[in-house]
Amino acid sequence: MTTTYRITCLINNDVAFDSRVWGEHGLSFLVESPEGKVLLDTGQSGEALAHNLAMLNLSLQDVNDVVLSHGHYDHTGGLPYLLTLPKRFNIIASEHVFEPKFSARYNPLRYIGIPVSRQMLETSANLILSEEQVQVLPNVFVTGNIPLQSEFEQGDKPLVLLENGKTKPDLVADDRAMVLVLPDSLIVLLGCCHAGIINTLRYVQNTFQKPISAVMGGSHLKPASPERIAATITTLQTEFSSIQRYHLNHCTGFDALHALKNAFGSQVSPFLAGETLEF
Ligand SMILES: [Fe+2]
Ligand SMILES: [Fe+2]
């Protein structure tokens, strides 16, 4: 098989027992395509990102494009480190990435948004904000905003926006996925998947009109009820039988990963920090 894409998990909650890379609650993938390299998300801290890059003998020197799946701190926390590097990145995200994002799981509310201002990114990087699909490299895309159409994927209640001292539900309009196009199929890279894995996969399949062969990243099934996990698996079986490989990690949670493993067997494996997948 000729390798077209190499995807390295730079940051994830979990690592292998004997790994020298660090784990932290967060996500970052380095995508290498024949046409260039793209960073999807930056993890929670520049310290872990720099450490893991060094341990893996990788660098961001030849990365020009950084995609932000959404504004939460565990995906954007490495941005201050990126801005210290002697280069000017293209940073691709939604306008909603700068919204005042809080978690109501804590009392008082905890800020869980992006740690850098829009002005800082505009000064130190090329900020590309779009609500529509963006082509990053040939055959490498970022989706636009993903509609919440599935009845069992309608957002995560404790996520709120705080505006003028008042909270309102945060449906994470900035949530987006990356899509790598193969000759006959698609690879889907999820960040935190706040839009829901079924909403995301339906949107990608409809937009690109090709079957999906692999999906990886955070599926945000950790807070999901057993009923929602069951409905997700049934829908994956009926609508997405083309998917051969599931490499879910980050916010997928043990219960969902276990249920997926029971349903799809050897097609499911975690994607630990420090690991590389080839397609
Ligand atoms: Fe998130
Ligand atoms: Fe996350």
Image (cartoon, helix red, strand yellow):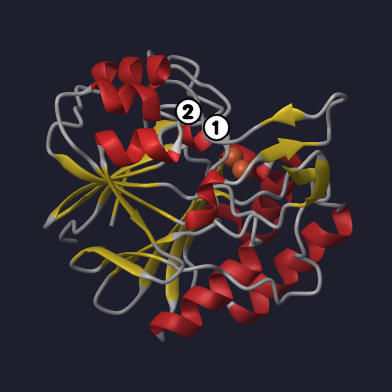
Label 1 CA crowd tier, 10 Å (few <14, some 14–19, many 20+)? many
Residue 21 quadrant: top left
The picture places residue 107, in percent across and down from the top left corner, at 88, 25
Q: Are marks 1 and 2 in contact (CB under 8 Å)?
A: yes
Q: Secondary structure at mark 2?
A: loop
Residue drawn at the location 53% of the way across and 35% of the way down: 114
Check disc 2 and report the residue beneath it: 77
Q: Secondary structure at mark 1?
A: helix
Up-down: is 3 above or below 73? Answer: below
Q: Given the image, on which type of amino acid does mark 2 rest?
A: Gly
Residue 81 quadrant: top left
Label 2 CA crowd tier, 10 Å (few <14, some 14–19, many 20+)? many
Q: Is residue 266 left or right of residue 256?
A: left
The picture places residue 8, in percent across and down from the top left corner, at 32, 39
Check disc 1 and report the residue beneath it: 74
Label 1 residue near ligand 2, CB within 8 Å: yes
Measure how far apart labels 1 and 2 are at the Cα level.
6 Å
Residue drawn at the location 45% of the way across and 30% of the way down: 116
Residue drawn at the location 73% of the way across and 65% of the way down: 232
Up-down: is 276 above or below 128? Answer: above
Please tell me in which quarter of the rendered image ligand 2 is found: top right
Residue 230 visible:
yes
Q: Given the image, on which type of amino acid does mark 1 rest?
A: Asp
The picture places residue 219, in percent across and down from the top left corner, at 61, 52
The picture places residue 153, in percent across and down from the top left corner, at 75, 65
Residue 150 quadrant: bottom right
User: Mark on residue 194?
Assistant: none
